[in-house]
Amino acid sequence: MSVTLGFPEPKTQRESTRSSRHTVEAARGEISDSAVRFLWEHAFRDLTVNELMAGTTLSRPAFYQYFSDLHELMESLLGQVESVMRATANPWIMGEGEPIAALRASLGGVIQTSVDHGPVLRAVAEAAPLDARLEAAWSAFMGRWNDAVCTRIEAQQQAGLIPEFDARRMANALNALDAAVLIAEFGRQPQGDPDAVLDTLHAIWVGVLYGSVPKRLPVSEVAQDMSTADSTPLSTRGDPTR
Amino acid sequence: MSVTLGFPEPKTQRESTRSSRHTVEAARGEISDSAVRFLWEHAFRDLTVNELMAGTTLSRPAFYQYFSDLHELMESLLGQVESVMRATANPWIMGEGEPIAALRASLGGVIQTSVDHGPVLRAVAEAAPLDARLEAAWSAFMGRWNDAVCTRIEAQQQAGLIPEFDARRMANALNALDAAVLIAEFGRQPQGDPDAVLDTLHAIWVGVLYGSVPKRLPVSEVAQDMSTADSTPLSTRGDPTR
DNA sequence: TTGACATACTGACGTCGTGTCAGTAGGCTG
DNA sequence: CAGCCTACTGACACGACGTCAGTATGTCAA
């Protein structure tokens, strides 16, 4: 009905086994697409199973064959976004190159992911408090970021690059900051300005961790080509003409 | 039934006018108390009008005489917390005394308010995305903080105390950080450690705004007696034995 | 081709929470 | 005590959810 793009039901039936109308894979994909499309245009509070399935070839009860409820669907979407986002944050997390430039590259990557999938992240963040299981998933998601950042901070503290504060708590705070800013800036249309957000977040991280403002550093060395960031869309983007 | 403390229905009927059972004031107060009590023990997602009114002497439909829905109730609670919180943030906001010490005092005040009313703040933050009106109220609440902080930053930028970055965006980011951290730390029981949170937030604000870590400053001058902070409870605290 | 099985799928139902309204009861006024 | 006013409630309709028995559709065996 309103499928806008991409894979027109390959129907490969990889193992030639049972499958009458949809592959489980395909059905979940179609439902996910509908959800993503919806969330680019509306808030999570307006997403009902009715509305969601109206955007697919299936009817409402079919939804419950693939997801136990809307929250589990959101959990699935979160997982997809996370895998994309993690990859883009590697430079600083992995300690590649000069720290302040690597930090800027990582923040840029995370920002790019937010530009591509902001509404999904926003929806997950909004839905999380409504369901214990999704809340745990969101908490775990943030926890993995906290662990990674905390590890990096501690490593650089030992190297004398970062002052001696409570690394765990600082990591939590900085990640919470990122999440709040990114969701506010890119969680709904019209989205904010990625470059301005990058400057702000970079200034904060650098100011806190390295005790200086980034502008004191050679810009030429800090600037990174953001177009190299992975911007593979999670799913079909919402049709703006809808 | 379970009212634990304070004003036992003064029944002053200030103007001796109409009032059969409750003053409007008293009824709204009783309902608010029940909500606050509930939110100290449970998440907003578990708060229903049924549950809420079971904690009062009234029945469910009576709720709708005093509030249009749960979201309006939350908006009312937010207003009460805001007035308390604003007062405690005065030192740095108003530019009283040495900036870094004033900042610590203001952060301390905000933290104290969060300790006293964290669950209410958490509930409002969680409920905001579910209702357009409450979302606007929350947004306005954060906006007033942003305005105040932004003004202060710009003033100190002109005085050469703070580097030249986008003040508005930075204020938004720092306030979003505070909100996220405070709600995470004090929004549910068991609450976090106020002193550790103060250290962390202070380190971030100082690192970002004044380009240094607070420990470089004389501690004796920074330390402030937190017991002077206004800790008047918003309402009856939840009974821990419940 | 046909029968028979497996399963993707759906119409219809029961449940729960919401918001409303007509009607009642409790207190005030003259 | 008559009358009124309004705080208050029982009962209803609505909407969304989650489920289940039953149907439709595709696959395999003979």
Image (cartoon, coloured by chain):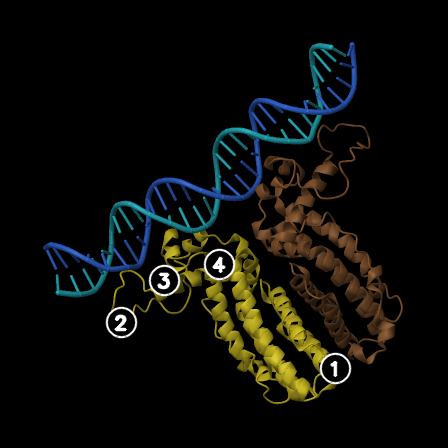
Chain colours: A brown, B yellow, C cyan, D blue
Sequence-wise, which precedes: disc 4 or disc 1? 4
* Amino acid type, callout 3: Ala
Judged by depth in the image, the label closer to the viewer, 2 or 3, is 2
Q: In screen coordinates, is A90 left or right of B132?
A: right
Sequence-wise, which precedes: disc 2 or disc 3? 2
Please identify the quadrant where the N terminus of chain A is shown: top right
* Residue A112 image offset from top left, x and y in percent: 76, 60
Residue at image coords 48%, 71%: B233
Task: Establish if B160 lies above or below B112.
Answer: below
Badge 2 marks a residue whose secondary structure is loop
Circle 3 marks a residue in which chain? B
Res. C30 image quadrant: bottom left
On the question of residue B55 being in view, the answer is yes
Dot 2 corresponds to which residue?
Answer: B15
* Amino acid type, callout 4: His
Q: CA distance from mark 2 to mark 3?
A: 16 Å
Circle 2 marks a residue in which chain? B
Judged by depth in the image, the label closer to the viewer, 2 or 4, is 4
Dot 1 corresponds to which residue?
Answer: B211
* Residue D19 image offset from top left, x and y in percent: 57, 34
Sequence-wise, which precedes: disc 1 or disc 3? 3
Residue at image coords 74%, 85%: B216
Q: In screen coordinates, is B233 left or right of B183?
A: left
Q: CA distance from mark 1 to mark 2?
A: 57 Å
Circle 1 marks a residue in which chain? B
**Label at residue B27:** 3
Badge 3 marks a residue whose secondary structure is helix
Sequence-wise, which precedes: disc 1 or disc 2? 2
Judged by depth in the image, the label closer to the viewer, 1 or 3, is 1
Dot 4 corresponds to which residue?
Answer: B71
Q: CA distance from mark 4 to mark 3?
A: 17 Å
* Amino acid type, callout 2: Glu
